[in-house]
Amino acid sequence: MPPRLIRRIAHLDMDAFYASVELLRYPQLKGLPVVIGGGRRSADDALLLAHADVPLNKIPVADFPRLAGYTGRGVITTATYAARQSGVGSAMGLMKAAKLCPEAILLPVDFTEIRRFSRAFKDIILDIAPLMEDRGVDEVYIDFTEVPGGQRDGGRVLARLIQKTIFQQTGLTCSIGVAPNKLLAKMASEFNKPNGIAIVFEEDLESKIWPLACRKINGIGPKADEKLQGLGITTIGQLAQQELDWLIDHFGQKTGAWLYAASHGQDDRPVELESEPVSISRETTFERDLHAVRDKAELGAIFTKLCEQVAADLANKGYVGKTIGIKLRFDDFKSVTRDQTVEVYVGDAPTIRRIAGHCLKRVPLNRRLRLLGVRVASLIRLQDAAEMASHQPPALMNQGQKASKSIVSEPQLFD
Ligand code: TTP
Ligand code: MG
Ligand code: MG
């Protein structure tokens, strides 16, 4: 008989994520206090401008902008572990942080890089353990139960493999908690941060979970915590000592029952697979109804902007698509859609604009417009499309061009 599988759920969270992504670019800052936050400033541009002729990893540490003297209302997005030793951390005002750690290097967030690495580490995990739930930019749940290595040493063997592979392929470290469920795994992933692994079994509840503050339960926010403190409850262990009925009396049926279950380490929520988007679209309702001919310039500009936004959304999410569509709503509130499917996946704004323009020409535009939308569907992941393209003749835009030829006799509208 095969051995009985016990439920093992992992929570993985990247270490000082935004800061760590910057350190990949500037490895000379490794080990130093670095904080990420505020908007992009002239000092950031000046740094790059002054060193335009050297690679980023050769910019001298002494030349980086410091926190000292910061004035403004910016807050810290995150800080390296070296900076955290001075007591600075997420959500703290940069001016306050400047007092605590003036020598810290201050860098802005690069969201494009962040999204790229977010996608990259999740793809690495998916290759090893396919049951992954995306929980935001730097964390996921993973169901280890049936994955090879997921039971060995409580999940430590698989956790180590994932941690090592992410580090080898991206240079980023993460921390992983493995436990009987999501609730405990989420707490466990913090136990040995950074670059740590923590294994929690059901029987560890009393020793490892009960001493923690109630706030460590994901779902107990500042308000609930304040109310619990008012009732004399600060730790999860104290919460676990309360009767179910007492909790329901104070917090209502639903929250009371949930608090009871959580404090006893119970949580049966499944790990939910990442759902792939079906389409990505942007639409806008105009301030006033616009006419296809009289407001041609304005409509054309809005149309182009929508295509750019859709292209940016696709890029950020890492998709391309081959069905491009438009949606129009007229002043009588009737809507029409048109779409066109091309042979090869596209994602860039000019191409989307061109194909959407073809769609537009198939709609009679004699009424004023209230709304315009652009949509890209039949999506696949960008990297899958790249792989497919390498096995196919480059037929990219022929289809779209053919379509455009067949309708050149149509009146030129705001396209
Ligand atoms: P976290 O995982 O909470 O923090 P972290 O990855 O920086 O550090 P840790 O090692 O403790 O996990 O958040 C992930 C990223 O989300 C973080 O790098 C920056 C961003 N973030 C904000 O933008 N605002 C915030 O208030 C927090 C907490 C994080
Ligand atoms: Mg993190
Ligand atoms: Mg996180």
Image (tube, grey):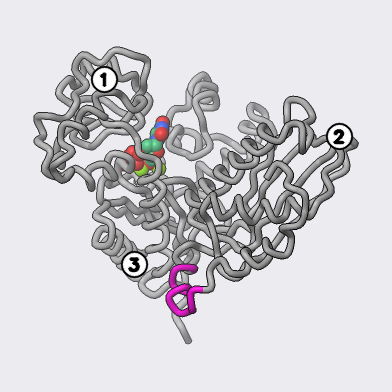
What residue is shown with label 3? Answer: 158
Residue at image mark 1: 97
Asked if one can make out residue 49 in the rendered structure from this viewpoint, the answer is yes
Residues in magenta? 385-394
At which x and y percent is residue 273? 55, 60
User: Quick one: label 3 or label 1, which is nearer the N terminus?
Assistant: 1
Which image quarter: residue 124?
bottom left
Q: Is 43 positioned to the left or the right of 320 in the image?
A: left
Q: Are marks 2 and 1 in contact (CB under 8 Å)?
A: no
Q: Of 371 and 293, which appears nearest the observer? A: 293
Is 391 part of what is drawn in magenta? Answer: yes
Left/right of residue 215 with respect to residue 176 in the rendered view: right
Image location of residue 384, percent across then percent down: 47, 69
- Image location (x, y in percent) of residue 308: 55, 44
Numbered label attached to residue 331:
2
Instruction: Please name the amino acid that badge 1 sits on.
Output: Ala
* Rendered position, 350 above or below 149: above
Which label's residue is closer to the chain start, 2 or 1?
Answer: 1
Mark 2 vs 3, N-terminal side: 3
Q: Depth check: 36 or 298 in front? A: 298
